[in-house]
């Protein structure tokens, strides 16, 4: 009969416990069964208070675009720069990605109606590759915008000041830990 000594069992149990702990930390399997919903509004600047609607003489000036050097109402609204729909890579991913220039000149990447999987160390990137090519990697010059806030909902990611958005072709949801793309969206320039 095979007899196991305490000297053998204790080290084996310690190694198995350590391996299980590392495996749980690395893969975080519970995230396959959880969702995090984030619903942020698009950031906007607060404009001057409006009183009882425009007066007749103000209407002509509003159409002209400025009054005494003040920006017109059109200039006080966020501007869509590019937009695209997510395509799935490693996990089912859907929704819309938009780049938006805000009233103060800053830029954000916005996800709307996002649906993807949770995972360990999932981040948001702008990539110089198109969405299909981003499945193989982010490419040179990719810009990190931070950790994915939630796998469901509407979210905003601040684009670093001075970033030329025309240099980027897609928005990518990327798992740093395993170097895989959950999904990506081509960013087609908005015209008009």
Image (cartoon, rainbow, N blue to C red):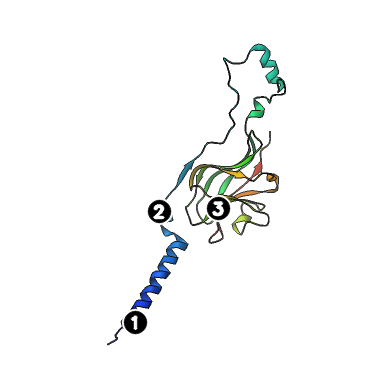
Q: Position of residue 19 (x, y in %)?
A: 42, 70
Q: Nearer the viewer, residue 148 or 139?
A: 148
Q: Are marks 3 and 1 in contact (CB under 8 Å)?
A: no
96 up-or-down from 76: above or below: below
- For the residues labelled 2 and 1, say whether their Cβ atoms are less than 8 Å apart: no
Could you say whether the residue bearing mark 3 is in a helix, strand or loop?
Answer: strand
The answer to which of marks 2 and 3 sits earlier in the sequence is 2
- Position of the N terminus, as image quadrant, is bottom left
Corner quadrant of residue 25: bottom left
Q: Quadrant of residue 16?
A: bottom left
Secondary structure of residue under mark 1: helix
The CA span between labels 2 and 3 is: 19 Å
Q: Which residue is mark 1?
A: 7
The Cα–Cα distance between marks 2 and 1, rounded to whole angstroms, is 39 Å
- Name the residue furthest bottom: 1
**Neighbour class for label 1 at 10 Å: few (<14), some, many (≥20)?**
few
Q: How far from the left and from the top, in percent, is residue 126?
A: 63, 50
Residue at 66%, 36% in the rendered image: 105
Label 3 packing within 10 angstroms: few (<14), some (14-19), many (20+): many
Q: Which residue is at the far top? A: 56
The residue indicated by pointer 3 is 123
Q: Which mark is residue 182?
A: none
Where is residue 168 drawn, in percent x and y?
Answer: 67, 48
Residue located beneath label 2 in the image: 33
Q: Earlier in the sequence, mark 3 or mark 1?
A: 1
| Residue in the picture at 69% in, 24% down | 70
Question: Residue at (66%, 57%) from the top-left corner?
Answer: 139
**Left of 115 or right of it: where is 4?**
left
Task: Residue 120: give x, y in percent of width and height.
Answer: 49, 57
């Amino acid at each position: 009969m095979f007899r196991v000594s305490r000297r053998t069992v204790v080290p084996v149990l310690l190694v198995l416990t350590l391996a299980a702990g590392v495996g749980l930390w690395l893969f975080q399997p519970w995230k396959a069964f959880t969702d995090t919903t984030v619903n942020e509004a698009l950031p906007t600047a607060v404009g001057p208070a409006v009183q009882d609607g425009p007066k007749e003489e103000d209407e002509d000036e509003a159409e002209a675009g400025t009054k005494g050097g003040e920006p017109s109402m059109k200039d006080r609204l966020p501007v869509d720069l590019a937009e695209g729909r997510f395509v799935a890579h490693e996990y089912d991913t859907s929704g819309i990605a938009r780049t938006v220039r805000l009233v103060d000149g800053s830029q954000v990447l916005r996800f709307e109606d996002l649906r993807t999987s949770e995972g360990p160390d999932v981040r948001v990137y702008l990539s110089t590759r198109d969405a299909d090519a981003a499945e193989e990697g982010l490419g040179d010059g990719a810009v990190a915008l931070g950790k994915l806030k939630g796998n469901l909902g509407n979210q905003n990611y601040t684009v670093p000041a001075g970033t030329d958005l025309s240099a980027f072709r897609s928005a990518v949801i990327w798992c740093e830990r395993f170097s895989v793309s959950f999904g990506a969206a081509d960013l087609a320039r908005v015209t008009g």
